[in-house]
Image (cartoon, rainbow, N blue to C red):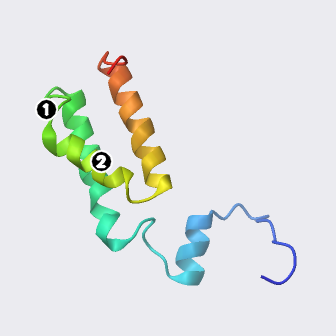
C-alpha cells in the first residue's frame, strides 16, 4: 500500500469490494465453502430435535471447521455456545 487507507464514504461493504475489484466471490476457500452450510443445516436439525446434540457428524464437522482458521474457530465456537444455551446444555 502507498499512503494511508481510504475509508469508505459510500457504505460499500468489504465483501462487495472484494467481489467487484478482486473477483473474490467466496468468504472462505473452495474446500471449506460448503462445510459451514452443512454445519448450519445440522445445527438447525438439532434445534428442531431431528438430530441429537451429540450427533457424530455434527461434532466432527465442528472440529474440522475449527481447525481451518482462527476466524472459523471463533464462528464455530460462538455457534456451539449458542446451541448449548438454547438446548439447556451450558455445562457441557
The crowding category of the residue bearing disc 1, from other C-alpha atoms within 10 Å (few below 14, some 14 to 19, many at least 20), is: some
The alpha-carbon separation of the residues under discs 2 and 1 comes to 18 Å
What is the x, y in percent for residue 65? 33, 53
Residue at image coords 21%, 47%: 60
- The spot of residue 57 in percent (x, y) is 15, 45
Say left or right for 27 vs 91: right
Residue toward you, 17 or 55? 55
Please report contact status of discs 2 and 1: CB closer than 8 Å, yes or no. Answer: no
Q: Is residue 43 above or below residue 89?
A: below
28 relative to 52 in the view: left or right: right
Residue 21: which numbered mark, if any?
A: none
Quarter of the N terminus within the rendering: bottom right
Q: How many marks?
A: 2
Residue located at (42% from left, 66% from top): 28
Q: Provide the secondary structure element on which disc 2 rests.
A: helix
Say which residue label 1 marks. Answer: 51
Q: Earlier in the sequence, mark 2 or mark 1?
A: 1
Percent coordinates x, y for residue 76 in the rendering: 39, 44
> Quarter of the image containing the C terminus?
top left
- Image vertical order of residue 72 relative to residue 59, above or below: below
Q: Which residue is mark 2?
A: 63
Work out whether 9 lies above or below 44: below
On the rendered structure, is 30 left or right of 75? left
Looking at the rendered structure, the secondary structure element under dot 1 is loop
Q: Residue at x 70, y 60 (%)?
A: 11
User: Closer to us: mark 2 or mark 1?
Assistant: 2
Q: Measuring 13% from the left and 32% from the top, which residue is drawn there?
A: 51
Q: Where residue 30 appears, x then y in whole percent?
A: 33, 72
Find residue 47 and report its image quarter: top left
Q: Residue furthest right?
A: 3
Amino acid at each position: 500500500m502507498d499512503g494511508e487507507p481510504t475509508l469508505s464514504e459510500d457504505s460499500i461493504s468489504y465483501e462487495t469490494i472484494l467481489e467487484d475489484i478482486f473477483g473474490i466471490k467466496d468468504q472462505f476457500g473452495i474446500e471449506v465453502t460448503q462445510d459451514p452450510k452443512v454445519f448450519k443445516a445440522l445445527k438447525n436439525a438439532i434445534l428442531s430435535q431431528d438430530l441429537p446434540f451429540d450427533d457424530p457428524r455434527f461434532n466432527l464437522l465442528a472440529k474440522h471447521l475449527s481447525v481451518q482458521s482462527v476466524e472459523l474457530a471463533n464462528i464455530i465456537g460462538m455457534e456451539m455456545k449458542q446451541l448449548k444455551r438454547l438446548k439447556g446444555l451450558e455445562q457441557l
